[in-house]
Image (cartoon, helix red, strand yellow):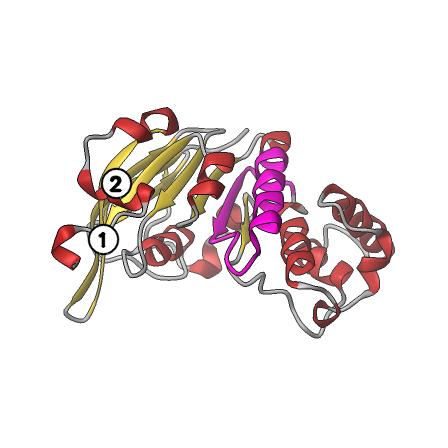
Amino acid sequence: MSPEVIIQDLSKSFGSNKVLHDVNLTVKAGSALAVIGGSGSGKSVLLKSIIGLIPPDKGSKVMLDDKDYTFTPITQRSEFLDKFGMLFQGGALFDSLTIWENICFSLMHRSKIDKREAHAYAVEQLALVGLKPEVANLYPSELSGGMQKRAALARAIATKPSLIFFDEPTAGLDPIMAAVISTLIASLSKKLGATTITITHDMKCVDIVADNIAMIHGGTIVWQGDKSMLANTNNELVDNFVNGRIPTAAI
């Protein structure tokens, strides 16, 4: 069953730099949330805080199915880690491993599959993202950017996660490949029945992958709602961002 994610009063500062300010978000089980916002708005720090790569400040709360993981050390998050998959912005494939080893890395590391099974399983996952079997034996450096992103997506879904995070999944891709990756994300997430959180500034990606949208600005959620409400938010910040308008104060 897909988990519900609840973020309550999440705050994070680096010295005097306050990056997140009392962020509150609820992601319903099986739904797809896209967090949008400009560069430096706090999107990546929010994602890393949820996952546990960055410890939030005291008083914040990150809950998954009524369990508070806010200050649980990453080494003690096995139950949480078993549930989620992650597609990193740059793919983050291991250069020294073949594609099939990358895809099954987590499964083999946790002794859930042996090497004989792993190669065949990786080929199955590659087929789901539109890559041919021979790609399994190649190294990341032998793939194009779009193929690397597909392979990274295959790795993200290999454990059949119930919660998946996508960090700028279309970054660095041409418009056609960006649409392909976004469509794959949407279809595979629905096939798994997973709860998803996508961090992006690509509104075409948002339109394809998201049910709900939250906009972060200056470290604070300034609007959250159903995707169908995006055109009529009556929020100048959201309107400017979605339509690519330059605020008068910035000119």
Which residue sits furthest left?
A: 249
The verdict on residue 222 being magenta is no
Question: Which residue is painted at 31% across and 54% down in the image?
Answer: 38
Q: Is residue 66 visible?
A: no
Residue type highlighted by circle 1:
Gly
User: Within the magenta stretch, is there residue 181?
Assistant: yes
How many discs mark residues in the rendered view?
A: 2
Q: Quarter of the image containing the N terminus? A: top right
| Range covered by the magenta-colored residues | 160-189
Which residue is located at x 87 percent, y 56 percent?
116
Distance Cα–Cα, label 2 vs label 1:
14 Å
Residue 120 screen position, x and y as percent: 85, 50
Crowd class of label 2 (few under 14; some 14 to 19; many from 20; radius 10 Å): many
Residue 184 sits in quarter: top right
Q: Which residue is mark 1?
A: 219
* Residue, disc 2: 238
Residue shown at 81% from the left, 59% from the top: 135
